Image: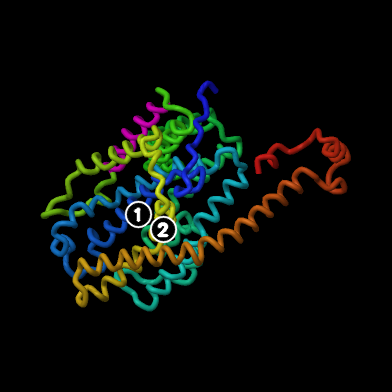
Amino acid sequence: MPAQHRQTPRPTASGPAKGRIAVLDGFRLVAALMVVAYHYVAFSSGWDTSPETIFKTAYLPSTYGFLGVNLFFLISGFVICLSCWGRSLGDFLTSRVIRLFPAFWLAVICTSLVLHFFAGPEHALSLSEILANLTMFQEPSGAKSVDGSYWTLWVEMRFYLLFALVVWRGVNYRSVVSFCIIWAAAAVTAKGMGSKELSEALVANDCWFFIGGIAFFLMWKFRPTALLWAIVVFSFLEGQYFVIANYHGHALSYRGEPAPVWPVVALLSLFYVLMAGVALGWFRKINWRWLPAAGALTYPLYVLHENIGWSITSRLQHKVPAAALVVGLVAGMLVAAWIVNRVIERPVSKKLRKVLVASFAEIRQHSTAPDAEKVPAGQAEAAATGRAQPRSAERL
């Protein structure tokens, strides 16, 4: 390709690990806190009095906190490309499993226990549904989620499954650009056909933010081009439409009327500008050591906060001032997220990585060295001479 690889600036001794973009960790924390504010301040769950009455100043800005999810999706498109470039399908799947499941398993167990013994606005699910949640595929299976915030994990999972096709075929500039264009065209087609099933499979409402994040990554790694900017603009235009079209599902009332729509477009525009800044190197000098540590808190914070927070709020709202209760809840959840990251995520991820790496290595071994006694003689001879190496094994 004519575009030249852009070398990642070498971090300083006090900066983050090589290959990590520290400012994205900061953006992730902001996105997580937006969602937390939406659930704790704007939602009525857990409160006996309307939050609009309790939080006269913070209520309206908090109603737009749900857009933190869209910022997450933009960052995810960028980071997935960054983390899987030059890696095999086995490496990609391993990285996703060790990133998502350890903290998620603990969150499912903790949330279920809290709701069983201290039920608030939400109640514990049946044991069968809780066990289904541990797969992270409870939504397509028809089981209810232990926590309402888990809906975004199924969106992310579908993105990973789709992008795994690119990784399997080989990640390069052409394949990734082609993926963005084909995915966008397929999503528009599915919506135009009115196919709910196909739209769900293609993540047709939310794919635009992943696509935008991928295009920004390509700008960062190579250089901005007219085609990449076109993909970004198209993803923004389609994305804002679907967010506003579904706004009734998120919008909360303000002074008896739905909250204004214009901040939705303003915030989405800001997110795209910030990601463009990452792609163009505006934040290259921001490499503070605490940012990766803050970024590590975002996922456990996200999967822990909602129902547990509402349960605590419902019990303490008449004993602790509302503002102090919310601040204490956020602080407590951040501490819990730090503990989960240190005590659960890191050690479990290391052990899980070893197991998965060994498993994929065994797949490659058995795929490239078939037992001659179990295959026809002609195939065994060809395999022995190296003429019949299965290409699929190389991609694992």
Query: Within 10 angstroms of label 1, few (less than 14), some, or many (20 or more) residues?
Result: many
Residue ID for mark 1: 32
First in sequence: mark 2 vs mark 1: 1
Q: Which one is nearer the viewer's eye here, 104 or 137? A: 104
The answer, for residue 97, to whether it is visible in the render is: yes
x, y percentage for residue 380?
85, 40
Count of numbered marks: 2
Tell which of 95 and 130 is nearer to you: 95
Q: Residue at x 52, y 21 (%)?
A: 2
**Element carrying mark 2:** helix
Marks 2 and 1 in Cβ contact (< 8 Å): yes
How many C-alpha atoms fall within 10 Å of the one at disc 2: few (<14), some, or many (≥20)? Answer: many
Could you tell me which quadrant the N terminus lies in?
A: top right
Element marked by disc 1? helix
Q: Amino acid at mark 2?
A: Leu
Q: Is residue 20 magenta?
A: no
**Residue identifier under label 2:** 297
Residue at 60% over, 47% down: 91
- Measuring 52% from the left and 45% from the top, which residue is drawn there? 161
**Please, what is the three-letter code of the amino acid marked with disc 1?**
Ala
Which secondary structure class fits the magenta region best?
helix
Question: In the figure, residue 245 lies in which quadrant?
Answer: top left
In the figure, is residue 317 to the left or right of 338? left
Q: Which residues are magenta?
A: 228-245
